[in-house]
Amino acid sequence: MVDLKKRMRIYKGTTIQWEQKLLDVPCAVQCFYHELASPPIPTLAVASGHQVFIYRYMRPYLKFTLPPVEVDPAESAVWDELKKETIDGRAAFEKLTNARENGTVLSNISLDLLALDEADAQAEFILQHRDQLHQQQTAITCMEIIKQNMDEPTAVSMLVLGTENRMVYVLDSAALNIATKVELDAVPTFMSVLGLYDVEYRITITVACRDGNIYTIKNGQVLSNVIELETQPVGLVRFDKNIYVGCMDNVVHCFHFKGKKNHSIYLPCPISCMSLLQLTKARVAKVLVVALNNGEVRLYNGKHLICTTKTNDVVTGLRLGTFGREEGSMVLSFKSGALMVKILQRSANLDVSSTAPGPPPEQDIPLDVPKKTKLYVEQTSREREQAIDMHRTFQRDLCKLRLSTARAYVNLLGAGHGPMSSSGGTQVRLNAQVLGMGPQFKIVVRIQNAGIHALYDIPLMCTTNPNLYRIPRPCFYLPILVPQQSYIVEVPVTCTDAMAGTDSVRIFLCNRSSNMPIISAIVNMPISEQPLTTTTDRRPSEAPRARARRRSPESERLVAPGPVGPRRSARQVAGALPAGSS
């Protein structure tokens, strides 16, 4: 996996096994086998700019550089004259402009010079680049692989490159030399390779180009049959004798390789990428996989939709093949940088359904509608004859209902019973919260002035049922209410009778200049808990001692002076008491 941050990563399972920093932004990556070995070890090719970096055994091995593009002789003559200082910058600018108007393909240096408007900038640019080696480098746009002489998964393969200078290069298996090169009429963007390179030298390359055409290369020659598309291609997949092309108008077209159009698949949103799922081990099946910008991944068998998978992100990369022991695996890379691996069930049905597409067959079964009665027919005829009067009556009743609702709401706001009062040009919010389990409660009242003017000397009154609740301080005074500032008032409430049920407490924010409150609130009190009583549990053996402690002061005064010694009997104590004492 490569990304725009110039990183290349190899995953084993779901963990990163190897990571390498690249020299330039990659545009394509392929895995191929350069030789027959046991066990077969793949080689990694990363295309970046005009170079292909080859990695073997997880190490950089070699670098292949595309040959430079031949510069037009007229352009080379202008730069040679500039180098010899036989012409000035203004004359060179005019010559390059005329050459471009005549259809000459200029190099990047000449185009950069023509993009400058000021004479000083042009002279500085010419002075900086006239002594350099004047050559034009191309860039790789797409890359594929082709088997050399055997159609096996680990057979020796060759790289196929598409470049910006409208060329298709086929490299040898060692990626050192160019085996074949073909020139096209437009810049290739997508390629699909079919066939073997050495078997009777038959190779078929289907190329989708930027001009909206599809070209076919066979045996090193461009065939005459060209498929013209309505819009630019965004994906290309070929299997058997069919070519599937995804276009920018949200349509997938299917063509025969000779150019005849088979069918089209219309999609609800733009296409992000396309690929082909091939199963050859347990069963033979080929399925077209299309990823959309809305996060859907669709599987098509021909023109029939088999399955739809929904993801939570936009799919930017799609790869299908063998992952571990599972042949039908799909790896998705998303725009956020995440990866997802999905494995096809071995019992999944990839065949086209025998039922015809469209509504379910239950739709053709008639409903058991009851017969029309005489009352229904009379009602229908009455509605048909008096439709205008019925509509007017309905509209009149609806307007009356809206008017009554509006009047009730205005009266509610004017009486101060709404959530926010706006009477008298003031806007005040009042919220109340009950704290406690009883019988002692606390009502926390929060008051906020939502207007733009301050309010002065505002009383807050609380009323309730006196037989059930007691409020020690029913009136509070707020000296000032500053706009956008919250004020908190705590009102203590005591429940006098916990067995009498519950009631409500009314809170009024009064106005000294009017008999109507600014705003009011009704607080429903919760059920009060029973008051807790403190009792002391004593053991039976401690009762005589407790009674002995509750003696009269005279007994304590008589008993206290006694000598300290052995415990005296009850007769001794009675003899010590004066007459008439008990």
Image (cartoon, grey):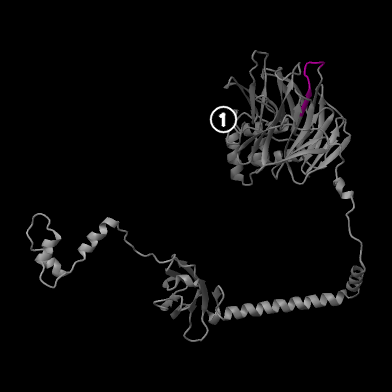
| Image quadrant assignment for residue 191 | top right
Residue 68 horizontal side relative to residue 502, left or right: right
Q: Which residue is mark 1?
A: 15
Q: Position of residue 227 (x, y in %)?
A: 85, 35
- Residue that protrudes farthest toward the left in the picture: 563
Q: Residue at x 89, y 60 (%)?
A: 370
Task: Specify whether residue 45 is in view.
Answer: yes
- The amino acid at mark 1 is Thr
Q: Residue at x 67, y 24 (%)?
A: 325
Is residue 226 part of the magenta span, yes or no?
Answer: no
| SS class, disc 1 | strand
| Image quadrant assignment for residue 339 | top right
Q: Is residue 74 above or below residue 430?
A: above
Q: Position of residue 441 (x, y in %)?
A: 43, 69
Q: Is residue 350 above or below residue 576?
A: above
| Number of numbered discs overlaid on the protein picture | 1
Q: Position of residue 48 (x, y in %)?
A: 63, 30
Q: 312 or 160: nearer the eye?
A: 312
Q: Residue at x 62, y 47 (%)?
A: 118
Residue 528 horizontal side relative to residue 215, left or right: left
| Image quadrant assignment for residue 423 | bottom right
Is residue 195 part of the magenta span, yes or no?
Answer: yes
Q: 38 or 35: nearer the eye?
A: 38
Q: Position of residue 86 (x, y in %)?
A: 64, 34
Quadrant where the N terminus is found in the figure: top right
Quadrant where the C terminus is found in the figure: bottom left
- For the record, the magenta segment spans 192-200
Q: 194 or 282: nearer the eye?
A: 282
